[in-house]
């Protein structure tokens, strides 16, 4: 079990921030900015980021199929929207993906420590 937790934390800290920032802030936001204002592009990109992350909290798979936990799912999408907005701001301010990648990695690491050390703590 410890190996699985270590693997999850490692992927969440390194791979997810890198891939998501390259796609959402590097590719998608820049593509949207070719058609929309910077503000509109950030809102669209952040909304999509929030919706993609609904699979982490809000959608539940069971033998009966997929179900939606609307209240907690909506809160999670709103949190991810705000987080994505902050990452976009960091990318714009630093004119680089690096600040967004670093803060995304720190956010994921904090979430993982909280989940595995506090919520899933043995005993």
Image: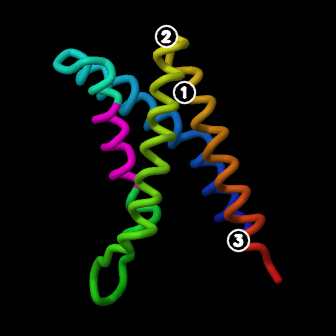
| Left or right: 97 as drawn, with respect to 109 | left
- Let me know if residue 94 is in the magenta part: no
| Chain-order first, disc 1 or disc 2 | 2
- Label total for image: 3
Q: Quadrant of residue 20?
A: top left
Which disc number belongs to residue 69? none
Residue for point 55% across, 12% down: 94
Q: Residues within 10 Å of mark 3 (few under 14, many from 20)?
A: few
Q: Are marks 3 and 1 in contact (CB under 8 Å)?
A: no
Circle 1 is placed at which residue position? 100
Looking at the image, the residue that sits furthest to the bottom is 64
Establish if 95 lies above or below 28: above
Establish if 78 lies above or below 114: above
Q: Position of residue 109 (x, y in %)?
A: 67, 47
Q: Position of residue 3 (x, y in %)?
A: 70, 63
Part of the protein shown in magenta: 43-53
Q: Residues within 10 Å of mark 1 (few under 14, many from 20)?
A: many
Q: CA distance from mark 3 to mark 2?
A: 37 Å
The structure's colour scheme is rainbow
Residue for point 33% across, 89% down: 63
Circle 3 is placed at which residue position? 119
Residue for point 33% across, 33% down: 43
Circle 2 is placed at which residue position? 95
| Chain-order first, disc 3 or disc 1 | 1
Image quarter of the C terminus: bottom right
């Amino acid at each position: 079990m410890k190996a699985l937790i270590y693997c999850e934390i490692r992927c969440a800290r390194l791979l997810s921030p890198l891939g998501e920032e390259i796609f959402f802030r590097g590719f998608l936001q820049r593509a949207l900015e070719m058609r929309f204002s910077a503000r509109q592009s950030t809102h669209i990109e952040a909304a999509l980021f929030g919706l993609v992350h609904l699979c982490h909290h809000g959608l539940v798979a069971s033998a009966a199929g997929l179900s939606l936990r609307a209240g907690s799912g909506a809160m999670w999408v709103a949190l991810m929207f705000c987080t994505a907005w902050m990452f976009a701001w960091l990318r714009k301010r630093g004119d680089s993906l690096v600040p967004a990648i670093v803060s995304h990695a720190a956010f994921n690491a904090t979430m993982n420590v909280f989940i595995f050390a506090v919520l899933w703590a043995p005993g």
